[in-house]
Amino acid sequence: RISAGAHHHHRLPLLAQHQSTRSLRSSHWKFSVTSSSLPTSGMASAAAAAPFLQFSYSGNHPDQFCRVHLPPPDCVEPVFPTAVIVHGGFWKNKWTIDNAAHTSLAPALASSARPYVAVEVEYRRRDHDGGGYPGSIQDVVDFLGFLPTLVNEQQLPVDLTRLVLIGHSAGGQIALRAGEIAARSPEPIACPALIAAVAPVTDLERAFHEHLSDEGDAAELFMKCRPEDERSVAQYQDASPLHHLPNLVPLILAVGTQDTDVPMKMVQDFAAAVDAAGGAPSELLLFDGADHYTPMDASTEEWKALRERIDSRLLGPSASGSQ
């Protein structure tokens, strides 16, 4: 059973961004392009059949790259909507673009009846030089700044006005923050038309106090501090989607009722705060009996339901289905 709630509001003026000594920003970068690649044997079987193109969006670190999955060449559309996927893993270095829960999604999105150009984004994680807060979030912001250049230089068949940013768990937190930073940016940047956040970590202080992750220290290690003084609390709030409302980008929030990694209540409370703040339209999907990972598997009914909502919001309804 899947239950959903929808909230619709008018678009509000920009909020002043929270200012701290390490506040996030949009920025221009010089970008380099690397050679194309093929999936490694460690990726999910669905991904193993689909080649991708790999590009660096910054020459500063080897984990600042993206993988572009194109629809089959026999697709007749001149341009396609874009799905940008940000993987989770509680910001731990061991969870990567190759082994996190998302790996079946990009090939499925690119090869479906209503295909997308699907882009997986890798980013510096907490133990990388410059990773953690704020670098992990900034990497995805910088990727969004790079994306129009990539599309133009590589002549990719992409419609950037139909861009969904999909994030899971810690990647949901990054997607929510990066998407809102892009929406507030005065600089040229690819701004998502929709953010789909699956089991997102929406409140870093709460994640710290509730000891989220297997070891219970994910928030502290990501933030590199504890929320014990005014400066550190400000940084925790800067990293938290909860403290950047009302949202300018429409949202789909999703979580399983049996999620033991990111509590369903955290996502429900964030959805209520989004609704109360009166920002862009939002909806909440609750997947009865689903755990933390089920909605990120392209073979599941939960993903198919989420995909249907993404397609409906971004592309309009389809009588024939999209999976």
Image (cartoon, rainbow, N blue to C red):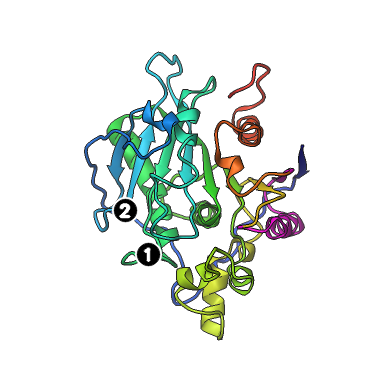
Q: Label 2 belongs to which residue?
A: 63
Please state which amino acid type lies under the numbered disc 1.
Gly
Label 1 close to label 2 by CB (< 8 Å)? yes
Residue 20 horizontal/vertical position (percent): 49, 76
- Above or below residue 305? Residue 88 is below
**Magenta residues (range):** 261-288
Q: What kind of residue is marked 2?
A: Asp
- Picture residue at 44% right of the left edge, 77% below the top: 21
Residue 207 spot, x, y in % from top left: 60, 68
Q: Nearer the viewer, residue 250 or 319?
A: 319
204 in the magenta segment? no
Which residue corresponds to mark 1?
A: 131
Q: CA distance from mark 1 to mark 2?
A: 10 Å
Residue 18 seen in render? no
SS class, disc 1 = loop
Q: Identify the residue at horizontal 32%, vertical 39% (top origin).
A: 150
Which quarter shows the C terminus? top right
Front residue of 167/302: it is 302
Query: Where 189 sits versus 133, above or below?
Result: above
Instruction: Return the residue nearer the eye: 303 or 180.
Output: 303
Crowding near the residue tagged with mark 2, few <14, some 14–19, many ≥20 C-alpha atoms within 10 Å: some
Is residue 264 shown in magenta? yes
- Categorize mark 1 by other alpha carbons within 10 Å: few (<14), some (14-19), many (20+): many
Give left or right: position of 147 versus 252: left
Q: Is residue 206 left or right of residue 167?
A: right
